[in-house]
Structures are given as structure tokens and as C-alpha cells.
Amino acid sequence: MGRRSERLSRQGMLAGDAGEGDVIQVVSRAFDVLRCFEGHEARLGNLEISNRCGLPRSTVSRLTHTLTRMGQLVYLPRDQKYRIGPSAVAMSASMMKGAQLRSMIRQRLQEVADQLPGTVGFVVPDRFHLVYVQFARSAAALGLHEGTGSRISMASTAAGAAYTAALAPEVGDALLAEMEREAPEAAKTLKPRIEANRQFLREHGYVVACGLWSPHINGLAVPIWSPQYQTFVVITIGLLSSMYDEQRLHAEVAPLMVELGRSLGSLVEGAEADVFNNRLARKAIAMAVQNNNKPITPGGLNELEAGTRRARPARSLRAGDGRR
């Protein structure tokens, strides 16, 4: 099997590009149930979980019973509800090993936040959403106030536009196809913009989204490749549209964010510790790459394994050095 075939086979679990038969549905649904518990103190009954994740109540009942037996959930007889269990808490604690690295990431985010009155975030993908792992904002920040653990839409944010644009076209199209099946309204928002986002990312190394998530918020985002997790992470900023129109985003915000992407790219690509609190984002992604001194060509594919088997300069996706 050739390198390209081998590389593509490694991403079969992503975005439905493999058949549904390759996905163990019960595992996927168990994670859907756990995602419903946004905080340690969250208490939910089977009906509430069913409404949140769109699964039949009978299926939810079997899953919560199993997760309780595993210690991932705890049943509260008096309330007839569940909350996160000790095994899930222990698992979360084991994912905190990269605290020092995340602290360094936050320091870099803060350096940019101190120069711009918005919220700067480091987000990771989780199906059709992205989750804030770190964030920073200045005391004068206005508008967007997301924080660690916040989930944002992949379809209607600058971060989601940057992430989907960075994916190899066949992977991005597969993700979009899955979104059309499971979240059609989100797909309807993303689909008309994805080709333009891909083109802009190839040329400039970042993506903007103005008034898409909210008419009062304009955003800009830069994707960064993480060879350890074989996926893109994203740095993003949200600013009041009344203060930063699209022209000002390009002129004043983009240079700071692209440079931040380069800096964090060095940290992420050289990291040995866990960066992410959320391992649900650990999926294999294919991507293409251009030579630093040559224009992008459709046939120029970079093998994922090259990112982990040989040393090379750490970098973010940027103009003149894009991975697509």
C-alpha cells in the first residue's frame, strides 16, 4: 500500500469518511452522554440527557447504567439523576500533566490580549464544536467572554472556519458530509464558505469571520498542526465589530495572531506532555503541504508520519508556508 493510501486509511474514524460500520456506535454514544455533563456538579436525569444528545431514552438508560457500573457516573437515588463519577474525575486528573505547557501557552495568549481588547483563545476540535483549553483577555476586553471549557460552534466561528479550512479537502468534505447528516443547520452555514476559507488560508495563513457567530463580534483565527495528536488546534480572537471591522482585522490583528501562531506552533510541535484536557479531539487528520519557496500545488501532499519521524522547524500554517 502506497504512502498516500496508508495515510488516508489512518483517518478512517474521522468525519464519516469511512463507512458507518467502522464506527463503534456504543462508544461514540457513551461519549455523547458524558459530554452532557459540562461541570463536576452537573446533575442530569435520563430524560435530560436524552434531550441534550438526541438519543432515545431507552438507549440513554442503558448507557448511564453501564457508565455508572464503570464509575464514570454516579447515581443519586434521591434526585433520580446522575453526576460525574470518581473514575471520570481521575481520568481528568491524569490529563492535567501538561499544566506547565498550558501555562506557557496562556502567557503567549496574554501577550496578545494585552494589546487588543478582546478574548484570545486556544481551542481544540470536538466533533462539530471546538473547546477552549486556554484563554486570555485584557482588563479592557469587551464583547466575547468565553473561558476554559467553553464550547463554540465549528460552523459559525472564525476558529471553526480556520480548522475546517486547514483540513485536507477530502477530510474536510467528509466532515461536512457528516455534519449535513447530524447537524444540517450548522452545515448550511459552513458549506457556502468553506472553499473561500481554504483559498484565503492558503494565501494568508489565517481566516476571518465577521458577524457570523454574532452581529456584534468579528473574529480571526490561525490553525496550528500538532504532530503529537495528529490534528489541528486553533488560536482565535473575538473583538467587537464596532471597534474592529474587517479591514482593521487584516491590518492590525492578523500580524499579531500570525506571529502568535508561529510562537505556539514551536511549543506545540515540540511538546512531549499532554496539552489537551479534552482527548475527544484526538483524531487523525490528513493535510497537504507546500515547499517554503514554491506555490501550493494540488498534488503536493505531506505525509503525516513525516511530522513525527524527522526533525524539522516548528511552524504554524501561514502564508508562504501553508499545510493543505
Image (cartoon, rainbow, N blue to C red):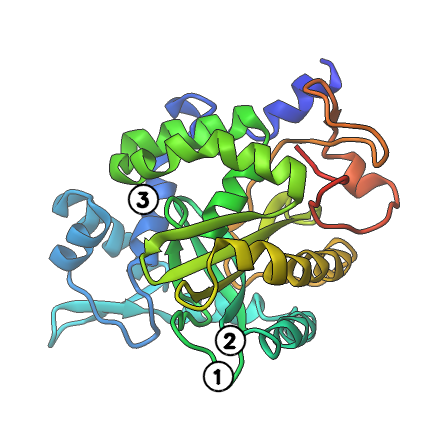
Q: Nearer the viewer, mark 2 or mark 3?
A: 2
Residue at (31, 40) in percent of width and height: 186
In the image, what residue occupies the spot 37% across and 48% down?
A: 156
Find numbered disc 1 in the image and state the secondary structure of the residue it sits on. Answer: loop
Give the quadrant of the N terminus. Answer: top right
Vertical order, 138 against 129 (above or below): below
Q: Identify the residue position indicated by label 3 in the image.
A: 29
Label 3 and label 1: CA atoms lie apart by 41 Å
Q: CA distance from mark 2 to mark 3?
A: 39 Å
Amino acid type at circle 2 is Pro
For label 3, the SS is: helix
Residue 255 location in percent, x, y?
68, 58
List x then y, in percent, for residue 84: 33, 68
Q: Is residue 99 left or right of residue 280?
A: right
Mark 3 burial class by Cα count in 10 Å: few <14, some 14-19, many 20+ = some
Q: Is residue 216 above or below residue 193?
A: below
Give me the disc on residue 117. Answer: 2
Give the alpha-carbon distance from disc 2 to disc 1, as whole Å.
6 Å
Is 127 situated left or right of 66 in this image? right
N-terminal of the pair, mark 2 or mark 3, is 3
Q: Amino acid at mark 1?
A: Ala
**Residue type, label 3:** Arg
In primary-sequence order, the first of circles 2 and 1 is 2
> Which of the two labelled residues, at mark 3 and mark 1, occupies the earlier sequence position?
3
Please state the horizontal and vertical placement of residue 213, each as a whole percent of the image: 34, 54
Looking at the rendered structure, the number of numbered marks drawn on it comes to 3
Instruction: Find the residue positioned furthest to the top.
Output: 1
Q: Residue at 47% across / 23% down in the picture? A: 18
* Residue beneath disc 1: 140
- 224 relative to 212 in the view: left or right: right
